[in-house]
Image (cartoon, grey):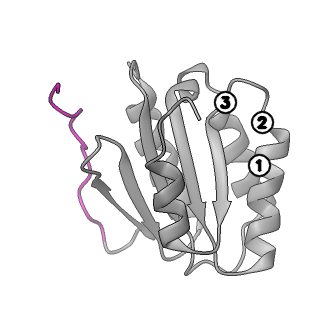
Amino acid sequence: MTDPKPLHFSPDPGVGFTAERRADGGMNLIFSDITSDTLGHWQKFAEEHLLGSDRLVRNLYDLRKVDHLSERAVQMAVAMNSDPSTRNIRLAVVVAGEEVKAAIQKVSDLTPAGGARMGIFSDLDAAEEWLNRPMES
């Protein structure tokens, strides 16, 4: 196995997410809020990790602590997921409520074909099970 790509993430108490490298080479991002500052940091972080993306990865976004996603957040996620590099990503998004689930479904619906393969879950174990399936299924 090749060495995982560096994560280049430093925790910042003013930003509402943390990131860690998954054992399979992907990333776990855990969000506590979706403020304007959080969105800006997330966008920069995500763009950096899409540069040179050349292998299949599994990412998990844990949004269970988030109650609301603004239209700006939805549009930013659609723009990021429209990047051709996202074709190499299987993305599980874990949510706690129907409002955030509907917003994530909107991201999925508005993303052109070829973006990240996305699954929306309310259970972390189900998300992990889906992520751990062979990439072609």
Q: Are marks 2 and 1 in contact (CB under 8 Å)?
A: yes
The residue to which callout 3 is attached is 115
As drawn, 3 above or below 29: above
What is the secondary structure assignment of the residue under circle 1?
helix
Q: Nearer the viewer, residue 104 or 58?
A: 58
Bounds of the magenta segment: 1-12
Residue 6 is inside the magenta segment: yes
Quadrant in the picture for residue 25: top left
Q: What's the mark number on residue 107?
A: 1
Amino acid type, mark 2: Thr
Determine whether 109 is above or below 37 in the image. above
Give me the residue at 48% from left, 45% from top: 133
Residue 37: percent from left, percent from top? 51, 62
Cα–Cα span, label 2 and label 1: 6 Å
Q: Amino acid at mark 3?
A: Gly
In-image side of 63 versus 11 (left or right): right
Q: Give the class, few, some or many, for how many residues have Cα within 10 Å of label 1's Cα (few <14, many ≥20).
A: many
Q: Measure the alpha-carbon separation of dots 2 and 3.
A: 6 Å
Residue 93 in the image, given as x and y percentages of width and height: 59, 59
- Kindly state the secondary structure of the residue where label 3 is placed: loop
